[in-house]
Image (cartoon, rainbow, N blue to C red):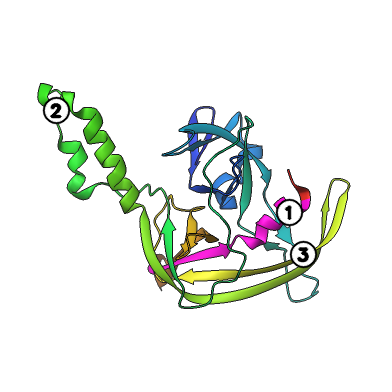
Amino acid sequence: LVLVSDNQIKSVGTGIVIKDTGILLTANHVIKDYFVLSNPKIIASSLSDIPQAEYKPIFYNFSVDIDMPGFFVKPLEIDLAILQPLQKTKGISFMELDDDIAPEGTDVIMAGFPDEIKPPLHFDETLDFNNPELAEKRLAIENFFDYLMRLIMMKSGMIGSTQRVNINTNFDMARFRKVISINGAVYWVDNSSTYGASGGPVINSAGKLIGIICEKGMTQQKPDLEVPSGSTMALSHKFITWYLDTIKP
């Protein structure tokens, strides 16, 4: 996913399609500036189905007021967003959802388009396509690198911590009002994600989506120095997919 304003890239992240209509989930911080930018566009590029499409947010900046005066100074912000393609479509490949909370010890696969990972030894930058023999095979070589990056962007891991979060609150939107109940979880996965992977899927061994990558775990070694902790925080999709069942966009 790329958020663009006046042809300048403002944010880069990842998304996962969860409906055959192309509806996808991502991390809210990837697209949160959409409505304050000039001429914004969200472009989704895929390795299958529709190579590139423009999207718009349909549910974003979602927060929950915790009715415990004196304990919480601000609403609980849910770093998830739902996007919809501008052009109606059907028959898109999508990831099924697992509505169960994954326990600690669950093996998972994380995926995301990393903006800090390159092919080994920057091999792609050493090729001279002015060479006629290489030029003839350029498409095959580029396809090879595409396949290689698909492997690099996937990581296995294990859920080291599952923190259940149950929310009951009033949801108001335009003339719609309803009491909603959300039974979700915050997952800490014992493997590090990369910048650009925010919004990417966390998938269980059944091939179903359990969560969305939201934060690269960091630890503070010194007051002015943060380093990766080797873990990734993901939010259960249930914190936001309830909206699709309630509103049915």
Q: Is tag 1's residue or tag 2's residue first in the polypeptide sequence? A: 2
Residue 63 in sight in this render: yes
Give the class, few, some or many, for how many residues have Cα within 10 Å of label 3's Cα (few <14, many ≥20): some
Which one is nearer the viewer's eye here, 55 or 195?
55
Query: Disc 1 designates what residue?
Result: 245
Give the class, few, some or many, for how many residues have Cα within 10 Å of label 1's Cα (few <14, many ≥20): few
Q: Are marks 3 and 1 in contact (CB under 8 Å)?
A: no
Q: Are marks 1 and 2 in contact (CB under 8 Å)?
A: no
Q: Is tag 3's residue or tag 2's residue first in the polypeptide sequence? A: 3
Residue drawn at 34 percent across, 48 percent down: 150
Query: Disc 2 designates what residue?
Result: 134
Quarter-wise, where is residue 124 in the image? top left
Report x, y in % for residue 27: 56, 53
Spatial separation of the CA atoms under disc 3 and disc 2: 60 Å
Q: Quadrant of the C terminus?
A: top right
Secondary structure of residue under mark 3: loop
Secondary structure of residue under mark 2: helix
Magenta extent: 228-246
Asked if residue 237 is among those painted magenta in the image, a careful observer would answer yes
Q: Which mark is residue 65?
A: 3
Residue drawn at 54 percent across, 27 percent down: 6
Asked if residue 210 is among those painted magenta in the image, a careful observer would answer no
Report x, y in % for residue 3: 53, 38
Which one is nearer the viewer's eye here, 235 or 154?
154
Q: Point out the frontmost of discs 3 and 2.
A: 2
Residue drawn at 89 percent across, 46 percent down: 175
Give the class, few, some or many, for how many residues have Cα within 10 Å of label 2's Cα (few <14, many ≥20): some
Report x, y in % for residue 233: 50, 66
